[in-house]
Amino acid sequence: MKDNTMNTSDKLIKILLVDDDEDDYILTRYLFEEFKSSQYELEWTQSYENGLESARNNLHDVYLVDFRLGEKDGLQFIFQAVGYGCTAPIILLTGQGDKEIDLQAMQAGAADYLVKGAFDAPSLERSIRYSIRHALTINKLQTSELKFRSVIQSASDAIFLVDSLGKVIMWNAAAERIFGYTEKEIIGQSSTILMGAKYSKKAIEQGVSDTMNFVLKPLMGKVVEAFGRRKDGSEFPLELSGSVWQTSDGAFYTGIIRDITKRREAEYQLVYEATHDSLTGLPNRSQFTDILEQAIKNNSGVNQFAVLFLDLDRFKVINDGLGHIIGDKLLVTIAERLKRCLRANDFVARFGGDEFTILANNLVHPGEAILLAERLQKELANPFNLDGQEIFTSVSIGITYSNSCKRLPEDFLRDADSAMYRAKAGGKARYQVFDSKMHANSLSLLKKENDLRRAIEREEFRVFYQPIFNLQTRKIVEFEALIRWKHPELGLVLPADFIPIAEETDLIIPIGKWVLEESCRQMSAWRKQFPQHPNLSVSVNLSARQLIQSDLASQVEQVLIENHLPAKCLKLEVTESSVMENAEIALKILKKLKKLGVRISSDDFGTGYSSLSYLNKFPFDNLKIDRSFVGKLDAESKSWEIVRTILRLAENLKLDVIAEGIETEFQAEKLMEFGCIYGQGFYFSKPVANQIATDLLVLNENELPYLGNFNPTIVVESSFY
Ligand code: C2E
Ligand code: CA
Ligand code: CA
């Protein structure tokens, strides 16, 4: 850049004439020749751009600029040149009829103006000299303005200046970066091209309704959010603040624009994460509930909607057996298949775990939801190929429809869920439409299931022990472990009230495992305390669901090892029905258990059907005569026959027999008479807490035969609960 502060008295003064008319140049050259001074050097350019380029770099000391420059005009030149940081004086040459722009020229930064044809050589020289001096005096000001400009240029926000007609007259580097227009491209253009077609809600709320206004409306102190448009046509969210300066010549506007794409993306990401499941990318439970809430609100009653609740039938087996990675892949693939089955307005979400929910909108006929359910089931019935493994799965679906009474999303989900449970209980891979009779059932079931889960967490279960006696010696030989639920409100809850729910919900798995661990721990403690009874054992009940756990034997082995308990001290009781439910698998598992040295009891014997072949097929050590036969021993001779037959059968098969439910001495006598050696029942003792069972073992040490005249249950009932 030239240093305009230099003394110009003897220095060569370079002047550039920016004028598209050659005649004007010739005329001007004549005038310069009249100066008769070698101090001036006149150059001429016809091109606005070349002139501006020179001004931008301060290549000349003075610019003479014609007001009329083809498409462009001299005023614009001054704006731009000043905007670029030109410090050399610019003299505007106007035509006879352009007098009214004089003032504007001065305001824009012109050093002087001359009316073409109305000035002679001396007045031109005077004007040039005056302008240079003027430039010197305002130089200090310009230096500070330069600093100001460099701040603007290095700002990270787009900063631009718009004249009263909406034309851009200044443009910084950030603006170029954000919008993609170079300064050259944008100066003189209407600022409306910078504004996107979409307006954010907020901008409209703030009264910004059209593009022109958007830029020109005084924004003093306000920040609006809107959309900008880049040179490539793409739109982006921005934050705009602006200010207006009123001059006698009209208003100028400064706009400061911040590109908030990143912020928006981050906000969007946050919302997305809060409403979507990260594994499958499907909307999550909270999003589904929102959408359902909307559907309920908007439901006019003309078209119904339905909620479908899907639960995979074998997911746990796959996940546990093949690992979580395969399990995750399966869920992702299922999500894709579900999406394929949907109709245009349907909405699917991953509700949690292996549960998915679908909102089937705009049903013209309820049958459409059924068709959808069938389509889903068909689609999921196709095998999945994951990492080269072929996997089969099926899904149980519960369906509930909207009706005239407006209810909450939870109600729909609960009903669809209980219908789904029905479908599962009905044999899986089915769908079931909710009917209101299910409601009452499912309500209490649901509550109980929740209570049970909480009970596990809060460790509310206890194991009680019912002693099993040698009927002749009246000594304890064994304990049967029987679970109790110490409910905070209901007191002691018996297994009949919660084991069926635990089985239905698979909660029996963790519960059963806990009973096994607790019983073995207790048994181990008794062995230490009563070393004189090395053969004392504990008998634990297994449910059908536990009997198909392929790793049951290793679980049991692990528990025995952890408690240093010989396998002979543990018995497992299974019922005929639980074994027959999955006979093949159960047989395998029972054989494995047997191999460990654990003994197996056939519980509730006599209540089933295939008794004989069953006893032969499975590796039992003893059988327990169901208490229904023992209880009737006093009255019915038929029961006597059954008990006798069972005892004979057991003798042939070399199985020990334990009679359950002995409530009188008479029953005990009779059983002994028939050859039954072991028995348990309220006559001897109810199931009791472990401390009391320990007391019974101490009593057992007593040489006196235990005849039942001291009934510990009385002690138990009054002191324990
Ligand atoms: P079960 O295996 O047949 O257990 C014997 C049941 O008969 C026990 O009921 C016991 O209290 C009761 N009982 C014993 N002697 C007499 C008597 O003289 N008269 C009468 N009326 N009843 C007698 P409880 O403890 O209520 O258990 C009921 C059932 O719950 C058990 O029947 C068993 O099938 C199941 N159960 C208990 N604990 C567990 C467990 O930890 N796991 C599993 N899977 N099932 C369990
Ligand atoms: Ca039992
Ligand atoms: Ca039993």
Image (spheres, rainbow, N blue to C red):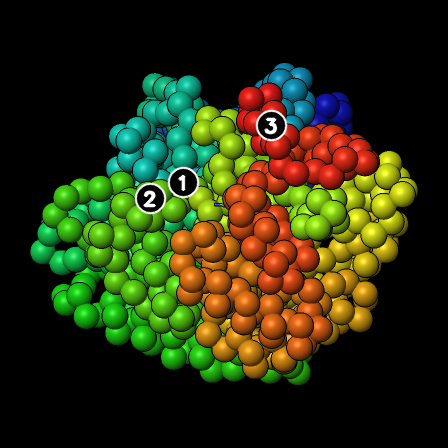
Q: Are marks 2 and 1 in contact (CB under 8 Å)?
A: yes
Q: Nearer the viewer, residue 305 or 423?
A: 423
For the residue carrying disc 1, how many other residues have a C-alpha within 10 Å: few (<14), some (14-19), or many (20+)? few
The location of residue 543, given as percent across then percent down, is 57, 59
Q: Is residue 443 left or right of residue 145?
A: left
Q: Which mark is residue 716?
A: 3
Helix, strand or loop for disc 3: helix
Q: Are marks 3 and 2 in contact (CB under 8 Å)?
A: no
**Vertical position of residue 138 compared to residue 634: above or below:** above
The location of residue 136, given as percent across then percent down, is 65, 20
Q: Residue 153 appears in which quarter of the rendering?
A: top right
**Is label 3's Cβ within 8 Å of ligand 1?**
no
Q: Is residue 156 left or right of residue 98?
A: right
| Real-space Cα separation, disc 2 to disc 1, in angstroms | 6 Å
Q: Residue 237 appears in which quarter of the rendering?
A: top left
Task: Name the residue beneath numbered marker 2.
Answer: 443
The location of residue 313, given as percent across then percent down, is 48, 67
Q: Which quadrant would the N terminus be assigned to in this image?
A: top right
Residue name at image x 51 percent, y 32 percent: 492
Residue name at image x 82 percent, y 59 percent: 567
Q: Is residue 520 left or right of residue 386?
A: right
Task: Name the residue beneath numbered marker 1.
Answer: 447
Residue lying farthest to the left in this orientation: 302
Mark 3 or 2: the one toward you: 3
Query: What kind of residue is marked 1?
Result: Lys
- Closer to the chain start, of discs 3 and 2, is 2
Helix, strand or loop for disc 1: helix
Mark 1 or 3: the one toward you: 3
For the residue carrying disc 2, how many other residues have a C-alpha within 10 Å: few (<14), some (14-19), or many (20+)? some
